[in-house]
């Protein structure tokens, strides 16, 4: 019988953000996550790694064991273990532990523990910022709605770069660094995205003229996906605002988190406000 109160207390501390103990646990967890990520970043510096490798190694395993104990504790006290294991945070919690053990067999894999940084997203729950997640949902909906247009756009860009790359391969040839069509396509992608590494460049007048055309095309292409997503985002915001109708004057156009009508001052979405408290 004594195990049940302990499990409930552990659940309130680990999963609860409405209790002082739960908030303190989440804040402590976030600080430990940030410390472990900083350790991984510092350990990747060759001079520091050579001098303090043994200390970094011990600290990394200390963090890994702490996260392992925390993960097992979550499994122990969670009433819905399967739901937690396959949830977003459950998968990230597991992925933040596995690289350290994989690193025992595959050198360098331990650096993938940088995925722990994703766990800092729990700060939204701790700081009561869940309302702002709705704004992220709006952006994701806009991207989802425009996925077909973006797919068509990227397909067109891919075809364009292959054509331009093939033309440069024919015009310039191996003697100017365009040794194959894939490498020429790589140059076209670098150029059309306005990156311009400069490792290879056309030398003939015709090749330089074509390169100029590719550069101008690149600037024109940059604006296309931005316009697509912006249009969908504007439509999504309009839809959400139209759903926020005032029960008193029946007028819409309110923000998703508005509490009072901007036209008559009446209260909006009383039930939503109660649920947030």
Image (cartoon, helix red, strand yellow):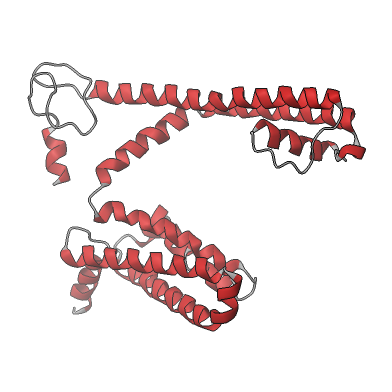
Question: Which corner quadrant of the image does residue 38 belong to?
Answer: bottom left
> Foreground residue, 43 or 32?
43
Q: Is residue 205 left or right of residue 121?
A: right
Q: How many marks?
A: 0
Q: Tell me, yes or no, if residue 14 can be seen here.
A: no
Question: Which corner quadrant of the image does residue 151 belong to?
Answer: top right
Which residue is drawn at the image coordinates 27% and 62% (left, top)?
15
Q: Tell me, yes or no, if residue 16 can be seen here.
A: yes
Q: Is residue 95 left or right of residue 22?
A: right
Residue 94 placement (x, y as % from top left): 46, 64
Residue 207 placement (x, y as % from top left): 83, 26
Q: In this view, does 234 lie to the left or right of 55?
A: left
Give the position of the N terminus as an image quadrant: bottom left
Residue 93 placement (x, y as % from top left): 42, 62
Q: Does 215 appear above or below 18?
A: above
> Foreground residue, 92 or 37?
37
Q: In this view, does 92 lie to the left or right of 19?
A: right
Query: Of all residues shown, which one is farthest toward the right?
Result: 175
Which residue is drawn at the image coordinates 87% and 28% (left, top)?
204
> Foreground residue, 240 or 31?
31
Which residue is drawn at the image coordinates 26% and 20% (left, top)?
242
Residue 169 placement (x, y as % from top left): 86, 32
């Amino acid at each position: 019988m004594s195990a049940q109160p302990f499990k409930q207390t552990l659940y309130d501390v680990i999963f609860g953000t409405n209790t002082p103990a739960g908030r303190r646990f989440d804040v402590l967890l976030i600080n430990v996550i940030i410390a472990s990520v900083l350790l991984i970043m510092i350990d990747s510096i060759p001079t520091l790694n050579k001098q303090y490798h043994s200390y970094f190694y011990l600290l990394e395993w200390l963090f890994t064991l702490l996260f392992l104990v925390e993960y097992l504790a979550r499994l122990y006290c969670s009433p819905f273990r399967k739901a937690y294991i396959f949830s977003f945070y459950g998968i990230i919690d597991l992925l933040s532990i596995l690289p350290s053990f994989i690193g025992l067999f595959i050198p360098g894999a331990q650096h993938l523990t940088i995925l722990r940084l994703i766990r800092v997203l729990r700060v939204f729950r701790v700081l009561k910022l869940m309302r702002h997640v709705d704004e992220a949902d709006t952006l994701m909906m806009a991207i989802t709605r425009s996925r077909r247009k973006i797919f068509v756009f990227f397909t067109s860009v891919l075809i364009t770069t292959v054509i331009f790359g093939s033309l440069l391969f024919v015009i310039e040839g191996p003697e100017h660094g365009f040794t194959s069509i894939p490498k020429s396509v790589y140059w076209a992608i670098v150029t059309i995205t306005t990156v311009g590494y400069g490792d290879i460049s056309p030398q003939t007048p015709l090749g330089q003229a074509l390169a100029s055309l590719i550069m101008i095309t690149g600037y024109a292409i940059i604006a296309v996906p931005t316009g697509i997503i912006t249009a969908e985002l504007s439509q999504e915001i309009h839809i959400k605002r139209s759903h926020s109708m005032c029960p008193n004057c029946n007028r819409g156009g309110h923000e998703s988190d508005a509490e009072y009508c901007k036209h008559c001052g009446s209260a909006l979405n009383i039930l939503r406000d109660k649920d947030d408290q």
